[in-house]
């Protein structure tokens, strides 16, 4: 089968583990099923919307109220935030979390190995989303679907001047109930509390204890490079990362979720975002010719 999406030139031959289809709304999606697990990846945003290891329950939360429309971010899975995170400083009209999740990426390779299926994508920014400050950046993304899931975003400075940017794998993890879930691995890190009443009050010291998210949680943990474990009482999801110096944890809570059109009533309880990232003080600058890779590996184990 060949991919009928935006400009893979020449069209790639897909392994038998991968099928390509197009939604009624015109989005191209790749479905992966191999001996180790299954996954779905939309070309828009190179967005992994689902991953289920064989015999497990789905690991990624996907909103039942999400839009699946060209140019609209998908709510759930692994949105890629790039080349900025949140609102763009000094540009209130710019889309939240950058343009990478809004535009189709090009599938550049698809193959199987002993551990699963590997898909790679390249971001080609259309003119209506191009931002001059970031024109010198090339972004490539590798998705490995197996017993674990690994995603790696590699950014290369191909221009002639240094470029600064932010990046995040904004992963929504599927839970039983966020308010009885324990997030461990960040307790020794100070954080910037985006939910604080005033910016002057937003810097917080390390909590010293694991986080049990209650109500709205929106935190940028600083200086975090080690794994984060998310235990919902039935299973533990572990996020191991590379090339990342910050971690965002986001749970909207009832009040904020009630104002988000693409989160259905009560569904916020079944997810938490643990985001492998380089944002804020951890933003990166690449000199001409330099590359940087940001990676996350997700594993799941049943609690005893
Ligand atoms: O609605 P969006 O643009 O996908 O963002 C969702 C959330 O993403 C989180 O990463 C941010 O820290 C939150 O502040 C934000 O509300």
Image (tube, rainbow, N blue to C red):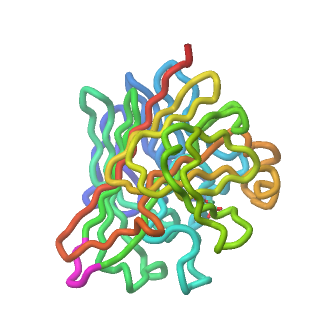
Q: Residue furthest left?
A: 289
Nearest the viewer among 9 and 53 is 53
Residue 73 appears anywhere in the view: yes
Q: Quadrant of residue 94?
A: bottom right
Q: Main secondary structure of the magenta part?
A: loop
Residue 142 appears anywhere in the view: no
Q: Position of residue 151 (x, y in %)?
A: 38, 46
Q: Quadrant of ligand 1?
A: bottom right
Range of magenta residues? 157-162
- Tell me how many marks there are: 0
Q: Quadrant of residue 213?
A: top right
Q: Is residue 170 above or below residue 100?
A: above
Residue drawn at x 47%, y 78% is 129
Q: Is residue 168 above or below residue 230?
A: below
- The quadrant of the rendering that contains the C terminus is top right
Q: Is residue 107 above or below residue 302?
A: below
Residue drawn at x 54%, y 47% is 274
Q: Is residue 40 magenta?
A: no
Q: Is residue 197 left or right of residue 140?
A: right
Q: Position of residue 53 (x, y in %)?
A: 47, 26
Nearest the viewer among 246 and 69 is 246
Q: Position of residue 32 (x, y in %)?
A: 42, 36
Q: Is residue 284 above or below residue 207?
A: below
Nearest the viewer among 34 and 195 is 195
Residue drawn at x 44%, y 31% is 299
Q: Quadrant of residue 281?
A: bottom left
- The quadrant of the rendering that contains the N terminus is top left
Residue drawn at x 31%, y 59% is 140
Q: Position of residue 180 (x, y in %)?
A: 71, 32
């Amino acid at each position: 089968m060949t991919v009928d999406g935006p400009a893979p030139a020449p069209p790639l031959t897909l392994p038998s583990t991968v099928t390509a289809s197009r939604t009624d709304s015109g989005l191209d999606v790749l479905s992966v099923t191999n001996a180790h697990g299954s996954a779905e990846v939309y070309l828009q945003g190179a967005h992994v919307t689902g991953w289920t290891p064989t015999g497990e329950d789905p690991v990624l939360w996907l909103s039942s109220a999400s839009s699946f429309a060209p140019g609209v971010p998908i709510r759930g899975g692994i949105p890629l935030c790039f080349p900025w995170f949140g609102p763009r400083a000094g540009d209130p009209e710019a889309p939240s979390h950058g343009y990478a999740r809004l535009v189709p990426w090009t599938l550049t390779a698809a193959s199987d190995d002993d551990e699963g299926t590997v898909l790679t994508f390249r971001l080609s920014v259309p003119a209506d989303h191009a931002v001059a400050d970031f024109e010198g950046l090339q972004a490539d993304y590798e998705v490995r679907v197996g017993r674990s899931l690994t995603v790696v975003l590699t950014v290369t400075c191909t221009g002639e001047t240094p470029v600064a940017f932010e990046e995040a794998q904004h992963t929504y993890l599927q839970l039983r109930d966020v308010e009885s879930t324990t997030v461990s691995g960040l307790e020794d890190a100070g954080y910037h509390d985006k939910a604080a009443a005033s910016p002057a009050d937003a810097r917080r010291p390390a909590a010293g204890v694991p986080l049990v998210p209650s109500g709205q949680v929106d935190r940028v943990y600083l200086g975090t490079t080690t794994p984060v474990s998310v235990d919902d009482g039935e299973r533990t999801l572990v996020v191991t990362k590379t090339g990342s110096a910050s971690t965002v944890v986001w749970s909207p809570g009832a009040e904020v979720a009630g104002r988000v059109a693409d989160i259905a009533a009560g569904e916020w309880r079944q997810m938490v975002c643990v985001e492998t990232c380089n944002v804020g003080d951890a933003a990166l600058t690449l000199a001409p010719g330099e590359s940087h890779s940001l990676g996350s590996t997700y594993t799941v184990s049943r609690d005893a």
